[in-house]
Image (tube, rainbow, N blue to C red):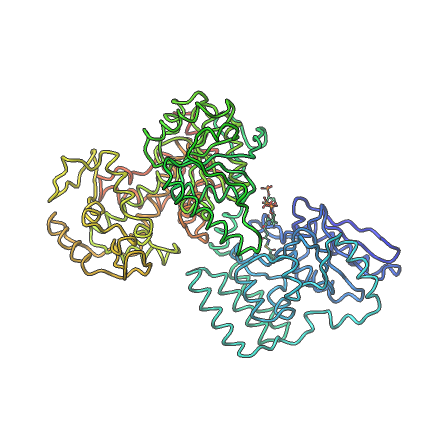
Amino acid sequence: MARYTRVKGSIALITLTNPPVNALSAAVRRGIVESVSRALKDEQVKAVVFCGENEKFCGGADIKEFSGSVSGPPLVPMIHSMEAGEKPMVAAIEGVALGGGLELALGCHYRVANTKARLGLPEVTLGLLPAAGGTQRLPRLIGIPAALELITTGRHVSAQEALQLGMVDQVTEGNAVQAAMELALSVIGHPLNPCRLSLRAPVWAPDVDGVCDAALAQVKQRSRGVMAPVACVQAVRAAAMLPYGKGMERERQLMDTLFRSGQAQAMQYAFFAQRNAGKWILPNRAQWNNTKAREVQRAGVIGLGTMGQGIAVSLVKAGISVVAIETDTKQLEWGKKAVTAMLQRDAQRRGVSPPLHLLTFTLSFHQLRDVDLVIEAVFEDMNLKKRVFSDLCKVLRVNALICTNTSGLNVDELAAVTDRQPLVVGMHFFAPAHVMKLLEVVYGSRSSPEAVATAMALGKRIGKVCVTVGNCSGFVGNRMLKLYLDQSVYLLEEGATPEQVDQALEEFGFAMGIFKVGDLSGLDVGWRVRKASGLIGPDVDPVKPSRWRLGRRYCPLPDMLCQQGRFGQKTGRGWYLYDSPGSKEAKSDPEIQNFLEDYRRKYGIIPRRITSQEVIERCAFILANEGFRILEDGIAAGPEHIDVIYLFGYGWPRHRGGPMFYASQVGLSVVLEKLEHYHRVHPDVPSLEPSRLLRRLVAEGSPPIQQWKSHIKNLRSHL
Ligand SMILES: CCCCCCC/C=C/C(=O)SCCNC(=O)CCNC(=O)[C@H](O)C(C)(C)COP(=O)(O)OP(=O)(O)OC[C@H]1O[C@@H](n2cnc3c(N)ncnc32)[C@H](O)[C@@H]1OP(=O)(O)O
């Protein structure tokens, strides 16, 4: 699908037509090959301009084709024949030129971009490398260091930056196609060899080896265990060392290794899962494309603690007026200072002025009378939240939405104290709220589709990856996290150290192990939650606290740590030792080793050697097992939604797809077998018992993850 038109007498305009992003599907590639051949044969045609329909040049190769057998004309010879053609070819870049789309533009002799265009080679984010000549042509155009940075990060650059780097010849505020046609007419008859990037010699740079070695070390540290960034460096190194033809061979070999790898499959799954999560659907069949969101121009934020501050910053940055409320002057001033500073820092970084005029800080609820929506972000306490909710109903417009930022409290119980249950939803932000991408939008049993649609649209507008979830304790993310945390401390009881567990998790791909994360977030947070839930009370023996509570295994180690004032980084001591309170570098603490040994002695536990494999199996499979239960309960609409929550909210490594995808990749029967084994060994941990859905899927031949939803439907109809 490429449209061929002759314009201005002597220009062949080739338009890629594959909405929404003009991806290079087999049909598009076929269309391009035919159109280029026609343009080269037509004697009236003196130059060729490429553009994309709907002001989007091209979003790259069609990723959907990667999972099947790829047919149609291959990209590399197609781009080569464009570059070798004896008529000037100009790319008119509007919207995006990404991946294969940019590689196509690099095969042209000239490139013109609209000011709003974005260019990049994001293949690395899909577990691949730019294998349509991108790793060989881009370094020849902009040099090794800049090409390494763009190709290993997959970063998109603006048209302006592309011009500075030398990726494009011209930037226009007007129509890029018009500008490209003018350029094309002006270069007819000019020699083309200097514009053929493949003909340029390997790029010389001082100490090219050193630059590539440094890039390799950097990607290995930044993306531990991920193959694609390493392959990207190797391919760019080839551009520096080898003639073009040999470099292309190297690019192909490296791509062959990546293309069918589990990592590439996981990352491509993650790409589509993220988009799929935006297509929300509620049990009553209301969904993203049949429900209208309300417009939100003014919002209220109640509570200016860490969460409220981040939420206020996110809203204001998206152009929404915010009325921010606190209960006393000191708290209000403190919050105001923090929010203002964050907005100023951000504005300074972007070279704009901070939108402080959008903020009102006040102690008075009356200032909320004309807001469209309120996000309550007070302390995680049901009674306090209920009081705030009833106070809100006295001042808000009757049709204003009330959203609660809670990490797990019952949204229905909160809604019940209001005069507007359909207009109440949960918005579970992650700390720090102006940075973390994930937002769980929690629908209660009476939340209206319109309220859910509004919260989802608002989340998207402030740059979040939003997932709708049902109302249960901990929703999706924290419900699963609780069991993962349990496993990690059980492993300590049985013989592991925090360092061992963290190392295994970091080797798996987590940026930080679970104990380091605990120290960072503050161990007192969970302690408070456990106290509030009745797990810790006056009846607990302070000398030898019970390891059996509420009918199941309980590990008192985290409570015992908190009793010693070890709250993590903020106190300079937690599972690790820090140089001073607030410092970040975690060091092993011999006191913790002694503490664990004493503990095991006290309870008569004989420590055993715990392998990294066991750490991963127990942590990852418990997550997946609870994920299956969440699907059975209808709390998440599909496995992709759970995976998106773990990818964007809990640091799950992207090259492992998510806990549900990981389970499918390991093999559901293996996961089942392992869970059965661990449950046999630990019968006092009910969450290790394999879920019914997992058993069912295995019994039905372990279908691919894309088909699980239909099996869930069958399972639920039998309930
Ligand atoms: C067999 C050997 C092959 C050799 C290939 C050699 C080298 C080339 C490799 C590549 O080119 S890989 C692809 C590189 N491109 C990308 O990674 C870009 C991916 N897309 C995006 O980043 C964004 O979609 C966008 C282009 C910036 C647009 O963002 P926007 O927010 O406007 O829309 P989205 O919701 O993200 O997407 C809309 C719609 O389009 C689908 N889609 C996007 N890009 C592709 C693609 N490259 N292939 C197939 N489909 C794509 C996306 O899934 C959405 O679909 P729906 O959800 O609406 O169904």
Residue 267 in the image: x percent, y percent? 50, 52
Q: Nearer the viewer, residue 302 or 268?
A: 302
Residue 328 in the image: x percent, y percent? 36, 37
Q: Residue at x 61, y 57 (%)?
A: 99
Compared across the picture, whether 93 is left or right of 665 comes to: right
Residue 609 occupies which quadrant of the picture? Answer: bottom left
Above or below, 193 relative to 476: below
Q: Nearer the viewer, residue 631 or 47?
A: 47
Residue 337 in the image: x percent, y percent? 43, 47
Q: Residue at x 32, y 38 (%)?
A: 690
Above or below, 614 relative to 403: below
Total marks in image: 0
Compared across the picture, whether 683 is left or right of 313 comes to: left
Q: Residue furthest bottom?
A: 206
Residue 647 in the image: x percent, y percent? 44, 47
Which corner quadrant holds the C terminus? top left
Q: Residue furthest top?
A: 419
Q: Nearer the viewer, residue 252 or 177?
A: 177
Residue 305 occupies which quadrant of the picture? Answer: top left
